[in-house]
Amino acid sequence: MEATPPPWWRAALSCRCPRCGEGRLYDGLLKVRPACEVCGLDLQAHDTGDGPASLVILLLGAIVVALAFLVEFRFEPPLWVHALLWPAITVAGALALMRPLKAALVALQFRHRASEMGL
């Protein structure tokens, strides 16, 4: 009897296999493994394309711009503070959001049986 897969959001936040919830999804920073090391699920069929990057750009861009305006109008710091602060926050935020968003798309593809190979 096959175990029930974890909810897609739990697999996404933990960056684990969408079928078993145990195996690691990534082999490196953002490279999806060829197959799950625990249950053997073929992960090569699930291609997220540019979806996660587009979502990170839109979401993080809106947040950073709103925060930059807030800091500028509230504290009026010199320009060099903005030049140091916002690139660092943007890079850190992009790295923090990219892995779980990509894992979420892989988990949703698995849940809805959508893949490049028509599984």
Image: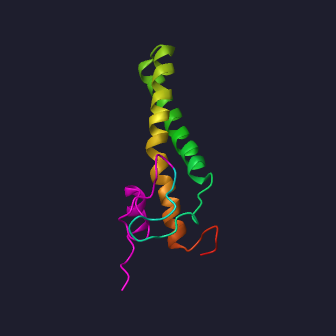
Residue 21 image-quadrant placement: bottom left
What colour scheme was applied to this rendering of the protein?
rainbow
Query: From which residue to which does the magenta span run?
Result: 1-30
Q: Is residue 74 above or below residue 112?
A: above
Task: Say which of 29 and 5 sits in front.
Answer: 29
Q: Main secondary structure of the magenta part?
A: loop
Q: Is residue 20 magenta?
A: yes
Relative image position of residue 119 (x, y in whole percent):
59, 75
19 lies left or right of 55: left
Q: Is residue 60 above or below residue 87?
A: below
Relative image position of residue 57 (x, y in whole percent):
57, 42
Q: Is residue 98 above or below residue 113?
A: above
3 lies left or right of 46: left
13 lies left or right of 102: left
Give the residue drawn at x 44%, y 36%.
92
Quadrant of the rendering where the N terminus is positioned: bottom left
Residue 17 image-quadrant placement: bottom left
Relative image position of residue 117 (x, y in whole percent):
64, 71
Q: Is residue 22 magenta?
A: yes
Give the residue drawn at x 58%, y 44%.
58
